[in-house]
Amino acid sequence: MSADHSFTATNVFDSSAAVSLSGNSLQIVNEPAESVLVIKIIDNQITATPPKVTAKVPSEAKTGEMFDVSAIADADGAPALSYSWGFSEGITQTGRKVSHTYTTPGMYEIRLTAPGVDGVPFAKTFTVKVEGTLKAYPNLQDNRRFRDPADQ
């Protein structure tokens, strides 16, 4: 370990477990020889940063029509651990790419949060304008947003 850097080490799955760095050695106490540990070593001289995320979110959508939102972290930055999308009517979805539908016209906010491995999340809010009227069909089955493949 370099003299001009200080490091900390933690057990990823059990933060109370004793893990310490001393010189060039990692010390693990009271672990069976056959156990597997995931140790996170942090260089304290490097500032924690959020992931650099590029998101694709439409600025406009039509009432009752599904649209996609997607995001990806820049490969040269801190990795994103997950992607959480918050839609302003209370719906939350998780995934790099998700689909959503608004059933009434208006201005809506979509919040993307992507926690990073450094413990600092990326967060951004997008606005989408939804216009049009929701089409109602005489056959009740045709009004559903999700179609069960068994119904086909």
Image: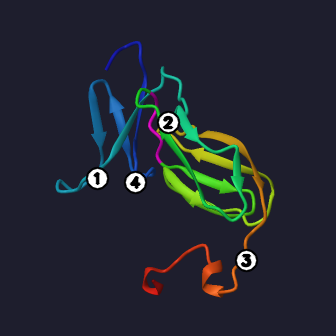
How many numbered marks, from 0 up?
Answer: 4
Q: Which residue is disc 3 drawn over?
A: 136
On the image, which quarter does residue 28 sit in?
A: top left
Given contact means CB atoms under 8 Å apart, are the residues at marks 2 and 3 in contact? no
Q: Residue at x 53, y 49 (%)?
A: 83
Given contact means CB atoms under 8 Å apart, are the residues at marks 1 and 4 in contact? no
Foreground tag (3 vs 4): 3
First of labels 3, 4 by sequence position? 4
On the image, which quarter does residue 14 sit in?
A: bottom left
First of labels 1, 2 by sequence position? 1
Task: Report the disc number at residue 78.
Answer: none
Q: Which residues are magenta?
A: 77-81
Task: Report the disc number at residue 13.
Answer: 4
Left or right: 89 as drawn, with respect to 68 = right
Q: Which residue is disc 1 drawn over?
A: 30
CA distance separating discs 1 and 4: 15 Å
Q: Which residue is disc 2 drawn over?
A: 118
Residue sitting nearer the eye, 90 or 57:
57
**89 w.r.t. 23: above or below:** below
- Secondary structure under the numbered disc 2 in the rendered image: loop
State the image coordinates of residue 27 (x, y, percent, origin top left). Answer: 29, 39
